[in-house]
Image: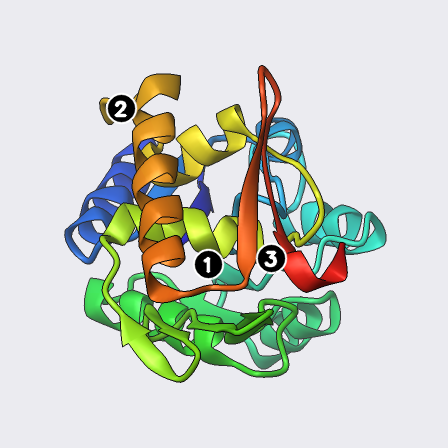
Amino acid sequence: MHIVIVEDQEELSGLIAERLNKTGIKSQSAISGEQALDLIDPEIHDLVILDRGLPDMEGLELLKILREDGIKIPVLILTAKDELGDKVAGLNSGADDYLVKPFEMDELVARIHALYRRPSQAMDMVLTLGNIEFHSTENSLKVADRYTELTVKEKDALERLMRLPGRVVSKDTLLLALYGHGDEGSHNSVEVVMHRLRKKLEEAGADIEIKTLRGIGYLIKDKKGE
């Protein structure tokens, strides 16, 4: 899972990022609405944590822009406001959940996982292509009804590709999804992960293929659909 934290209190943003990292959740941070708009990418990010009190715009204004742009990924609002009217305004603006400051980190993590599991969200929990089936919340892969073991990075790469079947996913997108900011990673690292993933799928008898477009990226497709 890859999350954007939109919070102008950098100390709090850092604490959230640290806690998420311990649970295996990658994150990036923005301290303003403008930064967030430049950063948020529905092809990379799975959820947004959004503070209402941003320096350049109200959080709900940013949320409205995201929804008008067709970005449907879940948004969890953080705010110091605890009035019912404020909560209703947030939810009516397109937020998926609401958490009042101060809050416990364990509750934040629990709410994030609950949002990610919701079947009503655009992020489907079960992805299928050809004879493979990937359960994103369980990180399990089945090929022809048999489970296949993958590493965490192989699973992350496969999920990114399967959410965009037949479309090119750039190396930069995969690099960010697999390693995030601050982690050691390179285009060569992505190539190694993709090589191992392709080999495991072939050995398991998957009737899909991952094509390499040199200098651009990768795409996944059903061989039978050619």
Name the N-terminal-most of marks 1 and 3: 1
Observer-nearest residue: 114 or 31? 114
Percent of width and height locating residue 186: 33, 18
Residue 78 shows which numbered tag?
A: 1
The kind of residue on which mark 1 rests is Leu
Query: Which quadrant of the rendered structure holds the C terminus?
Result: bottom right
Observer-nearest residue: 42 or 149? 149
Query: Which quadrant of the rendered structure holds the N terminus?
Result: bottom left
Q: CA distance from mark 3 to mark 2?
A: 25 Å
- Quick check: 131 left or right of 182? right
Percent of width and height locating residue 145: 40, 84
Q: CA distance from mark 1 to mark 3?
A: 28 Å
- Quick check: 159 left or right of 61? left
Q: Nearer the viewer, mark 2 or mark 1?
A: 2
Q: CA distance from mark 2 to mark 1?
A: 25 Å
Q: Secondary structure at mark 2?
A: loop
Residue at x 52% of width, y 81% of height: 118
- What residue would you read off at disc 2? 182
Q: Is residue 10 visible?
A: yes
Q: Secondary structure at mark 1?
A: strand
Q: Is residue 51 visible?
A: no
Q: Nearer the viewer, mark 3 or mark 2?
A: 3
Name the N-terminal-most of marks 3 and 2: 3
Residue at x 32% of width, y 58% of height: 203
Q: Is residue 222 above or below residue 99?
A: above
Count of all numbered marks drawn on residues in the image:
3
